[in-house]
């Protein structure tokens, strides 16, 4: 069986994290999201894989070339929609095939449920269905898809995972796959609804924390770096090569720490935390329930909770992220969310900075002793 992974989109609702890389390449538990999709396919014996790339395609292609999997890459020249991306893969399709988003997590069991079906859709229950295509089902058959409705008729949503026969291409008359599904239903074709076993999507940046927590449950413990004998480790902990962990540090898994990091001494890393390559945690710093990307420096005596830090942030001593619940205007929606902070790439913060339920864009600079709340655009200076 063949599979087409759609990885051409930006993921605009995850800005600022997707300004410089596509959503499929965002690291979760220190692995790009697309890797989990590929692994699930390989576990099902599906090795004829086509990946459609577009936005920041060079980064995706470089990464795919490093994987031990036979992957064919095709390019969507303009990011017009999911159906347009699928059309780019049409010359490579010779048999029944799966379509999967490259920026959602899906497990192998879910793929096993749908791969033998012809013309089917993987569905899941979601507490916020209005962010997705809402699916109306009768007797196991899809009757209708309503895209991102304000008042959703059900909590059942499309995961974006489909099983198609090659004649789907005759129904791709617009740029979106749900329109093709609607055309198939109108012509009398039956689309089966198959419940997913496990599926995760990150619609907004803070959703990455939940996905990170889920992916950390699957890490393989292992210590490749230099860990001081006084370090206390509990649960599943993975530490990469070239990383040093200083005396009197406490790490409670699940936690993954990348390569060439400097941790501590006297730091505390609590569960559901992933730390990328080249990160520095200075002494007496506490990190919990956070996703820290590569080349970040966090100064001493800092307290980081429920935070997503983009690559290359440099945060001075006594930095705090303060989780609280607030209303955020994101696009045309008002979201009520609780998290500490989302920082884009290259954020600089002086000592005694507090980020409270804040989204700071790329290259934001914050002066000493400031409390930052709400949304800061790229390049903002808070002095």
Image (cartoon, rainbow, N blue to C red):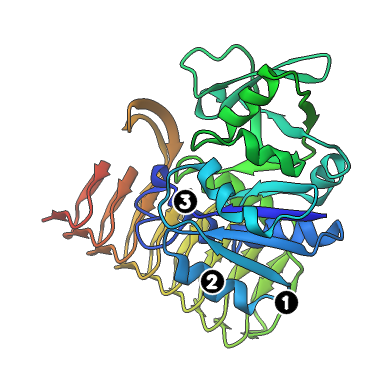
Dot 1 crowding, Cα within 10 Å, few <14, some 14–19, many 20+:
few
Residue at 58%, 52% (x, y): give it: 6
Dot 2 crowding, Cα within 10 Å, few <14, some 14–19, many 20+:
some
Q: Going from the N terminus, do you reach mark 3 or mark 1 first?
A: 3
For this rendering, which residue is in front, 148 or 359?
A: 148
Mark 3 vs 1: CB contact within 8 A: no
Q: Going from the N terminus, do you reach mark 1 or mark 2 first?
A: 2
Residue 373: quadrant of the picture: top left
Q: CA distance from mark 1 to mark 2?
A: 13 Å
Q: Find disc 3 in the rendering and name its residue.
A: 9
User: As displayed, is residue 309 above or below residue 243?
Assistant: above
Q: Is residue 273 left or right of residue 184?
A: left
Q: Is residue 332 left or right of residue 124?
A: left
Q: Secondary structure at mark 1?
A: loop
Give the x, y percent position of residue 276: 52, 70
Give the x, y percent position of residue 132: 55, 29
Mark 1 vs 2: CB contact within 8 A: no
Work out whether residue 147 can be spotted: yes
Q: CA distance from mark 3 to mark 2?
A: 14 Å
For this rendering, which residue is in front, 317 or 54?
A: 54
Dot 3 crowding, Cα within 10 Å, few <14, some 14–19, many 20+:
many
Residue 348: quadrant of the picture: bottom left
Residue 61: which disc?
2
For this rendering, which residue is in front, 263 or 5?
A: 5
Q: Secondary structure at mark 2?
A: helix
Residue at 30%, 66% (x, y): give it: 346
Q: Secondary structure at mark 3?
A: loop
Q: Find disc 1 in the rendering and name its residue.
A: 68
User: As displayed, is residue 333 above or below residue 30?
Assistant: above
Q: Going from the N terminus, do you reach mark 3 or mark 2 first?
A: 3
């Amino acid at each position: 069986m063949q599979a087409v992974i759609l990885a051409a989109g930006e993921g605009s609702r995850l800005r600022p994290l997707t300004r410089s890389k596509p959503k499929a390449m965002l690291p979760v538990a220190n692995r790009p999201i697309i890797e989990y999709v590929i692994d699930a396919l390989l576990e099902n014996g599906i090795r004829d894989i086509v990946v459609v790339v577009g936005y920041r395609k060079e980064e995706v292609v470089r990464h795919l070339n490093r994987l031990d999997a036979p992957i064919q890459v095709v390019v969507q020249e303009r990011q017009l929609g999911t159906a347009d991306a699928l059309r780019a893969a049409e010359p490579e399709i010779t048999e029944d095939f799966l379509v999967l988003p490259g920026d959602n997590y899906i497990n192998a069991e879910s793929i096993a449920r749908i791969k033998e079906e012809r013309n089917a859709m993987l569905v899941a229950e979601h507490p916020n269905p209005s962010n997705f295509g809402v699916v109306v089902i009768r007797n196991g058959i899809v009757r209708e898809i309503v895209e991102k409705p304000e008042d959703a008729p059900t909590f059942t949503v499309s995961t974006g995972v489909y099983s198609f026969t090659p004649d789907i291409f005759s129904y791709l008359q617009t740029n979106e796959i749900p329109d093709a599904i609607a055309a198939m239903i109108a012509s009398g074709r039956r689309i089966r609804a198959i419940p997913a076993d496990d599926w995760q999507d990150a619609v907004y940046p803070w959703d990455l924390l939940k996905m990170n927590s889920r992916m950390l449950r699957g890490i393989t413990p292992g210590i490749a770096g230099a860990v001081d004998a006084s370090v206390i480790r509990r649960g599943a902990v993975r530490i990469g090569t070239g990383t040093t962990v200083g005396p009197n540090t406490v790490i409670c898994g699940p936690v993954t720490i990348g390569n060439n990091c400097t941790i501590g001494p006297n730091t505390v890393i609590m569960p559901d935390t992933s730390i990328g390559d080249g990160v520095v945690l200075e002494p007496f710093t506490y990190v919990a329930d956070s996703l820290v990307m590569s080349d970040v420096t966090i100064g001493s005596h800092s307290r980081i909770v429920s935070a997503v830090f983009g690559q290359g942030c440099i945060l001075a001593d006594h930095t705090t992220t303060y989780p609280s619940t607030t209303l955020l205007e994101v696009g045309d929606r008002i979201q009520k969310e609780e998290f500490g902070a989302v920082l884009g790439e290259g954020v600089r913060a002086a000592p005694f900075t507090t980020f409270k339920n804040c989204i700071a864009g790329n290259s934001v600079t914050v002066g000493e002793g400031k409390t930052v709340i709400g949304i800061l655009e790229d390049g903002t200076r808070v002095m």
